[in-house]
Amino acid sequence: MTAQPPDVETVTALVADAAAAPSLHNAQPWAFRYLRDIGVLRLYADLARALPRTDPEHRGLHMGCGAALLNLRVSAAAAGLAPLVRLLPEAAYPELLAEVHLCGGGPSDGALAQLGPAIRRRHSSRLPFRDDAVPPAVRESLCEAADAEGAQLLFPGAWHVRSILDLVRDAEGREAVDPEIRRETARWTRTEPSNTAGAADGISGEAFGPRQRGTSTPVRDFAVGRPMPGRGWAPFEKNPNIALLGTARDEPVDWLCAGQALERVLLRATTDGLVASVTSQPLEWPELRWVVRDPVSAMAHVQMVIRLGYGPAGPASPRRPVADLLDVL
C-alpha cells in the first residue's frame, strides 16, 4: 500500500515487466505515459505497430495490450501495490486503452503477486512437446485463471481438436496465396537468429521451431516459404493439448479482457511447469472463426487457440527498451 505516487524507477520496472507480454508477431503494439504527480500510468495502442492485413479490426492488438496490462498488474502486486484499472476510460480517444491508478488503497492481490516470477520465464515454444496429457487439476487451475479475468477456457474433445487442426491448415493455405499477408508476415519475422539481426521486435529465426513431420499441431510457420538453411524437421506430439480462450461478447473491451485472461493463463501454466504456444490463424478469417467454437459450449466468441504441454521452453523474444515505450510527464 502507498499514498504517494510511485517513483519513476519503480514505474520503469513495472513497464519493463509489462513489455514482456506476448503480442501478434511480437510487434509489441503498446506505449505508456506516466503522470507522476497523480500516480497514473496510461496504456496506449501504438497503431504504427498494427498489422492491418492480418488484424484489420485490431482485435489482436487489443489482446496484446491486454496481456501487457496483466503483466503490469502482476508486477505491481509483487511490488506491494494495489492498482485500480479503468479500461477504455475516454470514448473520444479509443487508442487510450487503460488508466492504471497506482496509488490505489487496500492490500495487493496475492494471487497475482505469486505469478510474478513467471513473467520472465514465460516464452512461446514452437518446439515439439511430449505426448503427455495435462492433469485435470492443472486444467482446472488454468480455467480458474481465465475466469478471474472474465473469460472462459475450454479444453475441447478429440473430435473438436481434429476440426481445429483442419481449420488451422485451411488458414495456412489461405495465407500462402495472399501476397499481402505474406509481405506483412515477412515484415515482422526474420529467418536469421536474433543475435545476427540485432532487432528489438518481431520474431527471429530461432523461435520458428522445426518443420513438422508426420503430425499436425497448431504451430504457425513463420517462414512463409522462405529458405532457412539449417532448419530441420521433427515429429510433434500426436495428440496435442489444445485449449480455447473465449468471451461472451466481442467488443474492444472484451478483447482487452481476453488479453489479460490469456496472459494470466500463460503465467499460471508456466508456474505449473507447462510450456505453451498460441495461434490465431483460423480466427483471422471471419468465415473460419465461427467454426472454431464448440457448438455445445457457452463460449460465444473464441479469442485464441492455445497449445499446452510438457517440453522444452522456447527462446526469449527480442524486446524494445523501456525508454522507447515510456513517457514521463
Image (cartoon, rainbow, N blue to C red):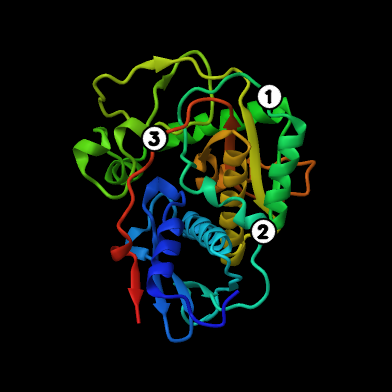
- The three-letter code of the residue at mark 1 reads Ala
Q: Which mark is nearer the camera, 1 or 3?
A: 3
Residue at 57 percent of width and 46 percent of height: 267
Sequence order check: which comes first, mark 1 or mark 3? 1
- Circle 1 residues within 10 Å: few <14, some 14–19, many ≥20: few
Classify residue 55 as left or right of residue 264: left
Q: Which mark is residue 110?
A: 2
- What label sits on residue 315 in the rendered view? 3
Query: In percent of the image, x 58 and y 66: which residue is there?
Result: 80
**Mark positioned earlier in the residue sequence (1 or 2):** 2
User: Which amino acid, by three-letter code, is at mark 2?
Assistant: Gly
Evaluate whether residue 300 shows in this view.
no
Mark linked to residue 296:
none
Q: Are marks 3 and 2 in contact (CB under 8 Å)?
A: no
Q: Earlier in the sequence, mark 3 or mark 2?
A: 2
Q: CA distance from mark 1 to mark 2?
A: 29 Å
For residue 49, above or below residue 231 = below
Please indicate, yes or no, whether residue 156 appears anywhere in the rendered image. Answer: yes
Q: Is residue 51 above or below residue 82?
A: above
The Cα atoms of the two marked residues, 1 and 3, are separated by 23 Å
Q: Is residue 173 above or below residue 93?
A: above
Amino acid found under the numbered disc labelled 3: Pro
Q: Which residue is mark 1?
A: 133
Q: Nearer the viewer, residue 323 or 13?
A: 13
Q: Is residue 124 above or below residue 49?
A: above
Closest to the camera, between mark 3 and mark 2, is 2
